[in-house]
Image (cartoon, rainbow, N blue to C red):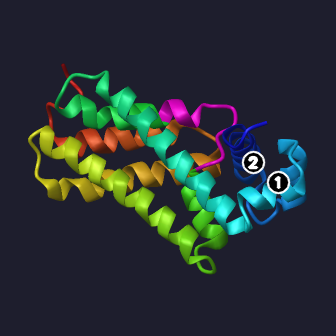
Amino acid sequence: MDHAEAETRLLDAAEGLFYERGIQAVGMDQVRAASGLSLKRLYRLFPAKSELVKACLDRRDRRWRARLAAAVGERPEGDERVLAVYDWLHAWFTEPDFRGCAFVNAYGELGAVDPAVADVVRAHKRAFRAYMAELVTAAGHPEALTGPLVLLAEGAMTAAAISGSPEAAREARRGAERLLGPAAGRS
């Protein structure tokens, strides 16, 4: 097995375990067993668990943002693209393995003790905010509206994880419609 294949297997296994069970609850031996790699190969690829966590989060960030952008890009320009964020969140929340925001989860577990993990989480949240700002201003709204719209999305992620219900995304969408104004969500 070449380096790229081994790394992919390792990241797939680690990301799944960390997201399902929590980072601190999963030992490197469990990651090794799930990946099918030897412990020696695992540590050659990622000498420390922190590096593995960071790599998982970096990869998840790219995938998450690409999926969101693809869904939003299918909608007409304007308010519909802003509201598409909440529709996409609803779809994500209904996935059978949804366990909340992996970045918030990682920050909750390691943010205070692992600056590298905290940096990755903050970068993800900044990128999401910047993306929302682009959508908001492209729809003709003041950039100042970005903060409340981001908080609706972030709150929906947390509420959906805790409640086990995707309805938080629908509630957040209704709040976003009110913030965007009377014409929001109507084509």
Q: Quadrant of the N terminus?
A: top right
Tell me residue 140's x, y (percent): 8, 41
> Along the horizontal axis of the image, is 144 left or right of 12?
left
> Along the horizontal axis of the image, is 4 left or right of 91?
right
Q: Which mark is residue 20?
A: 2
Residue 88 in view in this figure: yes
Residue that label 1 marks: 41
For the record, the magenta segment spans 90-100
Q: Which mark is residue 67?
A: none
Residue sitting nearer the eye, 118 or 93: 118
Q: Is residue 99 magenta?
A: yes
Q: Residues within 10 Å of mark 2 (few under 14, many from 20)?
A: some
Residue drawn at x 56%, y 51% is 101
Q: Is residue 139 magenta?
A: no
Secondary structure at badge 1 equals helix
Q: Amino acid at mark 1?
A: Arg
Residue 137 lies, with reference to residue 147, above or below; the image says above
Residue drawn at x 14%, y 45% is 137
Disc 1 + disc 2, Cβ < 8 Å? no
Residue 168 lies, with reference to residue 57, above or below; the image says above
Q: Main secondary structure of the magenta part?
A: loop
Residue drawn at x 88%, y 42% is 36
